[in-house]
Amino acid sequence: MANRNSDQISPVLIGLMGSGKSSIGRRLAKHFGTALIDLDNYIVEKAGKSIPEIFAEQGEEGFRDLESKALNEVLGRHGVIATGGGAILREENRKLLKEHPPVIWLKASPEFLARRIDGDNNRPLIAAGETLKKLQQLAEIRYPLYEQCADFILPRGDMKKREAIESILQFLTDWQAK
Ligand code: S3P
């Protein structure tokens, strides 16, 4: 296969909340001199409402509708795309993600994530407390779905952010050369 043009690469980051999709995405975007497209921010800007407001007014399904629409609109654009943790829930979204590689799963344990996001009031799914328990439930349902979509799995945890970026960049170099 011919080399993929590095200008064209638009990695998509998936993973549970708190796995660092936005912050790692920002670093990758900087590295490539390209834009970071953060799906949650995109939804918030389009709706003119915060995520907790959308959940409160339209319920989770209403939010998922906006999320699917947004994913449809941004995939294929040039940049680094950071999705929300639940973007892999709908089959139509997973199909779309598979059509827009490379997809990178930032895989982290519920324990690691709970330490990072406990008490965050911008995330309705953990607003009721019991963050660790909720993350364990989400991980059980979602890990197989992230795995289905992923071209590369980055284990978060002990790895420093700098090492995580290096590991992703190495994958992207190999992927482009395929
Ligand atoms: C969600 C994750 C959030 C946001 C919304 C729902 C989820 O994004 O989309 O609160 O279902 O896991 P982050 O993963 O960026 O926190």
Image (spheres, rainbow, N blue to C red):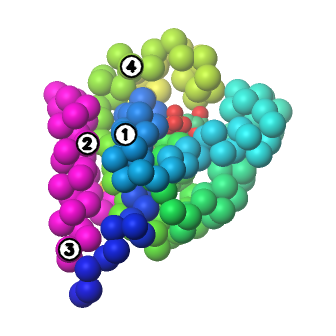
In the rendered image, residue 80, in percent from the top left (x then y), is placed at 45, 53
Q: Is residue 50 left or right of residue 57?
A: left
Q: Is mark 2 within 8 Å of ligand 1?
A: no
Instruction: Check disc 3 and report its element: helix, strand or loop.
Output: helix
Q: Residue beneath label 2, please? A: 165
Query: Residue at horizontal 39%, vertical 44%?
Result: 30
The residue furthest bottom is: 1
Residue 158 highlighted magenta (yes or no): yes
Contact flag, marks 1 and 4 (Cβ < 8 Å): no
Point out the image quarter for the C terminus.
bottom left
Label located before the other in sequence (1 or 4): 1
The magenta stretch is: 150-178
In the rendered image, residue 11, in percent from the top left (x then y), is placed at 40, 58
Contact flag, marks 3 and 4 (Cβ < 8 Å): no
Q: Residue beneath label 4, please? A: 116
Contact flag, marks 3 and 2 (Cβ < 8 Å): no
Contact flag, marks 1 and 2 (Cβ < 8 Å): yes
Label located before the other in sequence (3 or 4): 4
- Type of amino acid under label 2: Ile
User: Is the residue marked by circle 1 packed among few (<14), some (14-19), or many (20+) residues within 10 Å?
Assistant: some
